[in-house]
Image: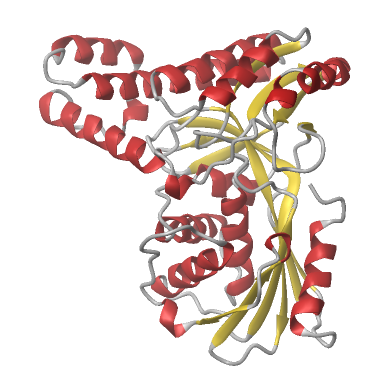
């Protein structure tokens, strides 16, 4: 990743793109996130443990784009200036094709307009970040949160901010839950509850452990992955269980293990195998988060690492959302002394592996991976491929004039 701070790169790129007279009026920084435990359960009404990291997407805004438009450019993608008509974004949805940063600008504008939030017009936006794209750290959620804070003329309360950013991603073709945006807004480590999109902050004492992300060399994009399929399969399974057994069930995340065991037995001939697998993952994953929270509160990181590994196995075998290269990387990580646990992370079908590792083992782990997995699986990313992450603050705005 680039060494220069995102805000500095965004300012420099803005001056190159909009002219030397362009002056930043505001800077918004929103963090990426680590999903520690609770894979694919936020949109299923389950619990997730997640943390904001010390890497951000920065949106720097200046003026003079014209009364009814927004101009946008992204430093890290060498993107040319795109002019966006604000009025044309009303009811906007991306129909097909790859999604780029300018689509998220349209999505956020459409979301703000749909909620009748007043929009800042005439802005020239320059964006840069050190949250890797396609790396499972929710760079898109960070971007949407930062854009919403920049484009709204009023300060949005956290629930409204999360809702706008989430809707923007939906408009871009990714039916995500609200966890990623909630982490970006809250900062630190949170326990997210998918039933009502509420969250509470926790303060883990990691001791000598650290969470690290290992680059698999396989990028992913939610709008072009099986993410939408998994969302649909989960909803279909929920509908079947509701219609045949539990009419008051609101989400799969509410299913207790003993209740699910009874339902599974009673509906053995009515639930298709793929739905059984999806529900089994959600039910056991939510229970892992509950156990994991107790482990965090007790600073029992060996136990938490075991739960991470179990989570990854379930995500791969039951939810079928991982990737062979990621699983090979996880296996190599788990064989390294000092690694308490490892798993795939995020939307799946690529992205990094997440490891919980003793700090003193980091150097040796990098050496082992460099001679092994990293050597046989090249990456398009620059820099260190096993990176320790620290938890950081939530999204913040700085007004410069």
The image quadrant that residue 209 belongs to is: top right
Task: Please name whichever residue, 113 or 193, is drawn nearer the observer in this view of the structure.
Answer: 113
318 left or right, relative to 311: left
Q: Is residue 346 above or below residue 171?
A: above
Q: Quadrant of the C terminus?
A: bottom right
Q: Residue at x 75, y 68 (%)?
A: 27
Residue 208 in sight from this viewpoint: no
x, y percentage for residue 136? 59, 39
Task: Please name whichever residue, 196 or 72, is drawn nearer the observer in this view of the structure.
Answer: 72
Q: Residue at x 51, y 79 (%)?
A: 118
Colour scheme shown: secondary structure
115 left or right, relative to 252: right
Q: Is residue 308 above or below residue 60?
A: above
Q: Residue furthest front?
A: 376
Residue 187 in sight from this viewpoint: yes
x, y percentage for residue 220? 54, 42
Q: How many marks?
A: 0
356 left or right, relative to 229: right
């Amino acid at each position: 990743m680039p060494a220069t701070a995102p805000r500095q790169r965004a300012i420099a790129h803005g001056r190159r793109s909009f002219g030397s007279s362009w002056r930043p009026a505001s800077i918004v920084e929103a963090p990426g996130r680590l999903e520690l435990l609770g894979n694919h359960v936020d949109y299923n009404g389950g619990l997730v443990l997640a943390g904001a990291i010390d890497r951000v997407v920065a949106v720097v805004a200046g003026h003079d784009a014209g009364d009814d438009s927004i101009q946008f450019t992204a430093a890290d993608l060498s993107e040319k200036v795109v002019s966006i008509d604000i009025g044309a974004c009303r009811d906007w949805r991306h129909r097909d094709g790859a999604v780029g940063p300018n689509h998220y600008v349209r999505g956020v504008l459409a979301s703000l307009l749909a909620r009748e939030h007043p929009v800042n017009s005439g802005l020239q936006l320059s964006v840069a970040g050190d949250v890797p794209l396609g790396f499972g750290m929710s760079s898109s959620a960070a971007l949407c949160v930062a854009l919403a804070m920049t484009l709204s003329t009023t300060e949005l309360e956290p629930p409204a901010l999360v809702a706008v950013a989430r809707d923007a991603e939906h408009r871009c073709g990714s039916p995500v839950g609200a966890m990623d945006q909630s982490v970006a807004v809250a900062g630190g480590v949170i326990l997210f509850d998918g039933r009502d999109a509420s969250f509470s902050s926790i303060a883990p004492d990691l001791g000598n452990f650290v969470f690290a992300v290992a680059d698999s060399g396989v990028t992913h994009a939610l709008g072009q992955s099986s993410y939408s399929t998994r969302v649909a399969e989960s909803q279909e399974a929920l509908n079947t269980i509701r219609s045949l057994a539990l009419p008051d069930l609101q989400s799969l995340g509410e299913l207790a293990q003993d209740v699910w065991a009874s339902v599974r037995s009673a509906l053995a001939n009515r639930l298709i195998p793929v739905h059984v697998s999806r529900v089994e993952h959600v039910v056991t994953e939510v229970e892992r988060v509950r156990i994991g929270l107790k482990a965090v509160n007790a600073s029992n990181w060996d136990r938490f690492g075991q739960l991470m590994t179990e989570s990854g196995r379930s995500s791969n075998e039951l939810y079928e959302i991982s990737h062979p290269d990621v699983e090979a990387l996880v296996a190599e990580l788990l064989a390294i002394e000092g690694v308490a646990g490892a798993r795939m992370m995020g939307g799946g079908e690529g992205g990094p592996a997440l490891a919980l590792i003793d700090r003193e083992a980091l150097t040796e782990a990098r050496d082992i991976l460099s001679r092994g997995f990293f050597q046989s699986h090249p990456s398009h990313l620059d820099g260190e491929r096993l990176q320790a992450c620290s938890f950081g603050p939530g999204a913040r705005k700085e007004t410069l004039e």
